[in-house]
Every structure is written in structure tokens, then in C-alpha cells.
């Protein structure tokens, strides 16, 4: 088989794996070598379906002996099969690198013959790249569950990042959909990699030249939507993985139907990408905002709200805490406020040393005030409307989400459409909108100048035609919101 044919088959087979992104490594070139794995040296770009395409993302082989129900490469699928020889793949990587097509390699594989045989071939590709071609670029390699620990150890010395995919969020689902895989065979290499990283880090404190072991850490991937596990179960699992195996990242992959089976969701539906997005947001809260999975989701409410981000959702369930006075809250409390992240929280804490912060000063900290203003007071004043009413805030925030989603999907109403049928606004909405002129950021098809005019007219209390059109826009938005969202999870 031609090399180009193999490349096309094996790159196509690799596209469902999402667990690759930034390098996280910082290794410079060596004299006489080529490439580097410096953090800035890997550029990240994403394909239309959100998959990382900055690396040569390829399978060593798609000739699998396993028969996982959800997988395009499973043994019983009638698809073209191909396998690279280690030298072929090493040469291809170098050729692409020298042409500036790629900046690193993401190497995975189906299980050919045995896990050991597969892992041996992958280790050999990395050995050729590192030792013969003196390639210092970034390499992310999959650890094959069930492979000999010695091979995993060897791979760890050659790769920057390793990952072992969990794929299914529970042992029961694993048993049903991938019966040849065992939970232990996935967790064992994870434990080994973690131990190797910790051990080598200690050694490098004493001996600077001790070789690195998986310097960019390990990651894993979980499939979302193929099996009935709730977001709560998934987040608890992710939290356990971060804590126990010091994962660098858990990647969530919205299930895409490529096979038919009574064990899988009916094909034809769109992949649950919004759910995937919410899980990434919740995951971010676990890693950088010190949230606990149990705080975000409880047994009686196990799913994330698709209309609202998890931090807003958490805040609205805690009216006893909000609104928070930004001039008194400590750093950890600031982090809990929707619209305030670690950077803006640090800036707020530092700006307060010179005196109390006013609302204008708050804008300069980078806080996202269109969300944060509902949850804070600034010098005792509440800027989120009448008072802290979770139901009203939920409606306003979800209306904004619905509006943005519709705009994104190309069904956004234009300002002209809306102006053509002006109707009087209900008093309550006028009141709300006047209280909260920021509630809708400039719609994509309203020119900036028009939006400025409206804000200006609002400030001077002289609403004109421009304001009327935007208000009509807001009315339509409120109606859509009511239709889209009947009950609140608060
Ligand atoms: S082992 Fe991997 S490649 Fe093989 S069928 Fe299962 S998921 Fe697919």
C-alpha cells in the first residue's frame, strides 16, 4: 500500500480522539538536533468540529483485535485497514516537520495482535525520532492498556505527554460497550505514569541532568452521551482522576454515532457538544476555582444546565451568599463570583490596597460585569437591577444565552426586521431593561455607532428611535426566553 494511502486512512481513523492540545513542555533544541518543544513552539489550531490539528495526529494502525461497540475501528467494521512501519512513520513525521506542516506528533493506535506488540511499535517510532533523527519536538503518545510496564516506562522517557483513555465513565458501561477492556488495565498504566512523574521530579531536584519522564504530564479522554451516566458522575470521576493520578487534563468528547447498536444512542442526532462545553466549564471550576464536584451537582440535580454556565448556576442556588461586596470579599470568595476569574480577582485584591474600588474601577480589572453585576455590590450599591432575585437573574442570563445561540445558528433577527413591527413594551420589561441597559451586549448586526447612540440616549433620559428599536429587540428576546425556559432550577 502507498504511504499516502496509509496516511489518509490512519489520519482519518485518529480524528475521534480529542485528548491532544497544548504541549506544556519547555525543551529547547540541542546542538545538531532539530525542533523544540517549547510551550510557544507548538501552535494550536482547531478543526471545524473542535479537534486539535496542530500536531500530526495519526494512528500507528487501525487494524484492531478488539470490538468496542462505539468505535469506528472495531474489528467487525468493514473499513480499509492500514499499519505503518515504525520507520515509515518516523520519516513521515520528520518530512512534515521540515516542511513546517506540523510542530509535533500525536501518536495513538488500535490494538494490533497484542497490546505489547502495538506498544513496542510506538516506542520504536519515538526512539527513531529522538535518537536517530534527534527530534526535539513535542510528542504525545497513547499508552496501550494491558501493555508491559517496561514498555510504558520506556515510552514515558521518550514522550512529552502520555494518555490512557478511559472513554466510558463507569465500569458497567465499559463492560457493556468495550468488554475486552478492563478497568484495571486502564488504571494501572495511569498509576505507573503518575508514579514515574513524581519520582523523576524528585530525582531532578537532586540531579539536574536526570532524564525527564512525561514532562508535560498525563491526560485522558471521556466520551459524553454514549452511555447514561450523569454529569455528576462524570465530574466526580474527573475530580478523582485529577486528585489520584494528578492528571493534567481530562478531555470530554461528545459522542458521534459512527456505528449502530441497540446499546448506543440512535444515530442521526447531533453530538451533544453543548453538554461537552458545559463539562469543560465545570472541569475548569474544579481545577482553577477550587470547586468540588459535589458543590456543582447534587444527587437530586445531577445534570448541568445547558442554558447557563455552571458557576452562574451554582451562584443562583446560593442566595444566602450573594450579592457579595467586592471591597470586602477575600480572594477565594471573589473567585466564586460569576464573571470574576483568577486574574480579575487578583487585580481587585491588589487595587483595594489603595482604597475602595468603585464600579468604574471594577471594569478596569477585567471582570465580566455583564454577569458579575448581578452577584455583587460595590461600595454597598447593587448594580444588578432591583434586588438579588435568582429567578429574575436566571431569566435574564438564559435569555442572553438563547439570543447568542440563535445568532450563532444564523436565525438572528436583524434590527430592521424588528423595527418593522413595533409594539408597546410591557411595563415590567421596560422597567427591567431601563434598570439593566447592559442586559444585552451589542447584537452582531447592530453597528457599534448605533449601540453607542442608544446607550447615550438611555443615559440622557431621551430615548429616541434607536432606543425603540433596541428595546423591541429586547422584547423579542424576552419572549423567546419565556418560550425556551419554563421552570428554574433554583
Ligand atoms: S481498542 Fe481502541 S481502536 Fe480498538 S475497537 Fe476499542 S476503541 Fe477502537
Image (tube, helix red, strand yellow):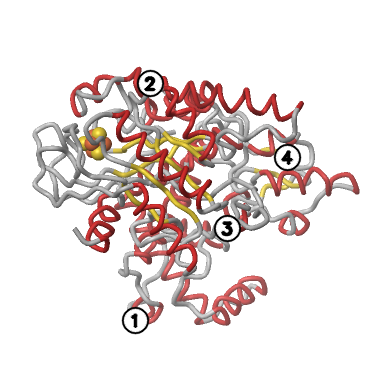
Q: Looking at the image, is mark 3 or mark 4 earlier in the sequence?
A: 3
Q: Which residue is mark 2?
A: 299
Q: Which residue is mark 4?
A: 325
Quadrant of the rendered image containing residue 462: bottom right
Which one is in front in this view, the residue at disc 2 or the one at disc 3? 3
Which one is in front in this view, the residue at disc 3 or the one at disc 4? 3
Quadrant of the rendered image containing residue 63: top left
Q: Residue at x 34, y 27 (%)?
A: 145
Q: Residue at x 74, y 47 (%)?
A: 378
Q: Pick whichever, 159 or 296, lies toward us.
A: 159
Quadrant of the rendered image containing residue 349: top right
Q: Which residue is mark 3?
A: 35
Residue 420 badge: 1
Q: Pick whichever, 472 or 178, lies toward us.
A: 178
Whether 388 is drawn above or below 230: the answer is below
Q: Looking at the image, is mark 2 or mark 1 earlier in the sequence?
A: 2
Distance between the alpha carbons at the discs numbered 2 and 4: 31 Å
Q: Looking at the image, is mark 1 or mark 3 earlier in the sequence?
A: 3
Amino acid at each position: 500500500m502507498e504511504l499516502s494511502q496509509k496516511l489518509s486512512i490512519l489520519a482519518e481513523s485518529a480524528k475521534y480522539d480529542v485528548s491532544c492540545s497544548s504541549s506544556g513542555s519547555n525543551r529547547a533544541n540541542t546542538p545538531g538536533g532539530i525542533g523544540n518543544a517549547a510551550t510557544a513552539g507548538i501552535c494550536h489550531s482547531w478543526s471545524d468540529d473542535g479537534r486539535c490539528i496542530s500536531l500530526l495526529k495519526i494512528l500507528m494502525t487501525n487494524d484492531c483485535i478488539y470490538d468496542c461497540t462505539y468505535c469506528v475501528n472495531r474489528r467487525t467494521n468493514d473499513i480499509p485497514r492500514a499499519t505503518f512501519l515504525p520507520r515509515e512513520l518516523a520519516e513521515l513525521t520528520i518530512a512534515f516537520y521540515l516542511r513546517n506542516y506540523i510542530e509535533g506528533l500525536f501518536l495513538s493506535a488500535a490494538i494490533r495482535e497484542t497490546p505489547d506488540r502495538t506498544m513496542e511499535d510506538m516506542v520504536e517510532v519515538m526512539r527513531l525520532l529522538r535518537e536517530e533523527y534527534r527530534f526535539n519536538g513535542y510528542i504525545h503518545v497513547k499508552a496501550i492498556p494491558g501493555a508491559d510496564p517496561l514498555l510504558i516506562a520506556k515510552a514515558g522517557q521518550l514522550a512529552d505527554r502520555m494518555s490512557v483513555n478511559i472513554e466510558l465513565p463507569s465500569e458497567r458501561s465499559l463492560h457493556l460497550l468495550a468488554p475486552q477492556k478492563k478497568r484495571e488495565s486502564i488504571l494501572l498504566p495511569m498509576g505507573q505514569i503518575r508514579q514515574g512523574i513524581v519520582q523523576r521530579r524528585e530525582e531532578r531536584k537532586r540531579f539536574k541532568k536526570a532524564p525527564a519522564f512525561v514532562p508535560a504530564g498525563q491526560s485522558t479522554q471521556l466520551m459524553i452521551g454514549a452511555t447514561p451516566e450523569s454529569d455528576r458522575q462524570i465530574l466526580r470521576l474527573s475530580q478523582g482522576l485529577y486528585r489520584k493520578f494528578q492528571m493534567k487534563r481530562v478531555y470530554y468528547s461528545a459522542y458521534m454515532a459512527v456505528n449502530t447498536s441497540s446499546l448506543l444512542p440512535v444515530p442521526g442526532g447531533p453530538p451533544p457538544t453543548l453538554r461537552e462545553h458545559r463539562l469543560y466549564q465545570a472541569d475548569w471550576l474544579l481545577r482553577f476555582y477550587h470547586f468540588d464536584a459535589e458543590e456543582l451537582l447534587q444527587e437530586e440535580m445531577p445534570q448541568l444546565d445547558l442554558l447557563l454556565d455552571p458557576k452562574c448556576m451554582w451562584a443562583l442556588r446560593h442566595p444566602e451568599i450573594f450579592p457579595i461586596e467586592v471591597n470586602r470579599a477575600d480572594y477565594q470568595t471573589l473567585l466564586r463570583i460569576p464573571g470574576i476569574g483568577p486574574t480579575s480577582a487578583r487585580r481587585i485584591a491588589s487595587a483595594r490596597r489603595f482604597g475602595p474600588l468603585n464600579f468604574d474601577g471594577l471594569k478596569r480589572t477585567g471582570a465580566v460585569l455583564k454577569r458579575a453585576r448581578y452577584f455583587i455590590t460595590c461600595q454597598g450599591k447593587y448594580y444588578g437591577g432591583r434586588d438579588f432575585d435568582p429567578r429574575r437573574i436566571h431569566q435574564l442570563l438564559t435569555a442572553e444565552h438563547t439570543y447568542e445561540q440563535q445568532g450563532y445558528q444564523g436565525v438572528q433577527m436583524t434590527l430592521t426586521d424588528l423595527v418593522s413591527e413595533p409594539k408597546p413594551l410591557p411595563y415590567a420589561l421596560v422597567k427591567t431593561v431601563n434598570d439593566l441597559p447592559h442586559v444585552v451586549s451589542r447584537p452582531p448586526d447592530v453597528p457599534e455607532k448605533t449601540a453607542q447612540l442608544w446607550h447615550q440616549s438611555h443615559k440622557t433620559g431621551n430615548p429616541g428611535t434607536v432606543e425603540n428599536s433596541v428595546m423591541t429587540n429586547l422584547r423579542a428576546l424576552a419572549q423567546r426566553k419565556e418560550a425556551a425556559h419554563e421552570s428554574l432550577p433554583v
